[in-house]
Image (cartoon, grey):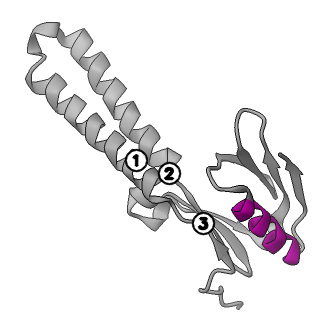
Amino acid sequence: MEVPSEVPIFETTLSRVDNLIAIGQIALGALGITWTTSKAVNLGWGLQLFFCLFFAGWIVQAVRRAKTFHLFADRLVVRRPFTFTTKTDQVYKVQEIREVIFSRIKGPHLYIRANGRYADFRIDFTEKTRNIFISELVKLRVKVSSKM
């Protein structure tokens, strides 16, 4: 049985601005839900439900938007740090990854094609970070395409 490596070869982090934006969106969403359920009682249940769902969706988007990438010798892990659990980590074994595509169609995205799976992630890191990520993937013999 192969033991997974615990030290990442490469990893991205969230900048302070990204952290502040995500925390701000989560806080504003929670405040919006609180306001809607306590102060907006005269709006009627339909409008209250709409606002609660709107702010809940806002919170979910903030949590989903923030992500980090961790490349190990045997796997690539996409982690959402604001979920506070590893159950939401998406893990791709390096030998199963057929191709990683960096593209600017619909904004900067990273597409991962693995055995039977296809995923895309919006990315928010610099060109230098992207180039280092690409070089580390190539060292692991992962096919990489960049359309940026």
Q: Residue at x 81, y 63 (%)?
A: 97
Residue 144 lies in quadrant: bottom right
Work out whether residue 32 or residue 50 is closer to the camera in this orientation and state it: 32
Note whether 46 is above or below 33 in the view shown. Answer: above
Residue that numbered label 2 is attached to:
66
Residue 45 position, x and y percent, is 19, 12
Residue 118 appears in view: no
Q: Residue at x 9, y 25 (%)?
A: 38
Task: Give residue 127's mark.
Answer: none
Q: Secondary structure at mark 3?
A: loop
Q: Is residue 12 left or right of residue 26?
A: right
Residue 7 position, x and y percent, is 61, 86
Magenta residues, dominant SS class: helix
Work out whether residue 23 or residue 128 is closer to the camera in this orientation and state it: 128
Q: Which residues are magenta?
A: 128-140
Tag 1 or tag 2, which sits nearer the N-term? 1
Residue 25 position, x and y percent, is 35, 40
Residue that numbered label 3 is attached to:
12
Structural distance between the alpha carbons of marks 1 and 3: 16 Å
Q: Count residues near mark 3 (Cα–Cα under 10 Å), then give few for <14, some for 14-19, many for 20+.
A: some
Q: Secondary structure at mark 1?
A: helix
Residue 147 appears in view: yes
Tag 3 or tag 1, which sits nearer the N-term? 3
- Callout 1 amino acid: Ala
| Quarter of the figure with the N terminus | bottom right
CB within 8 Å, label 2 to label 1: yes
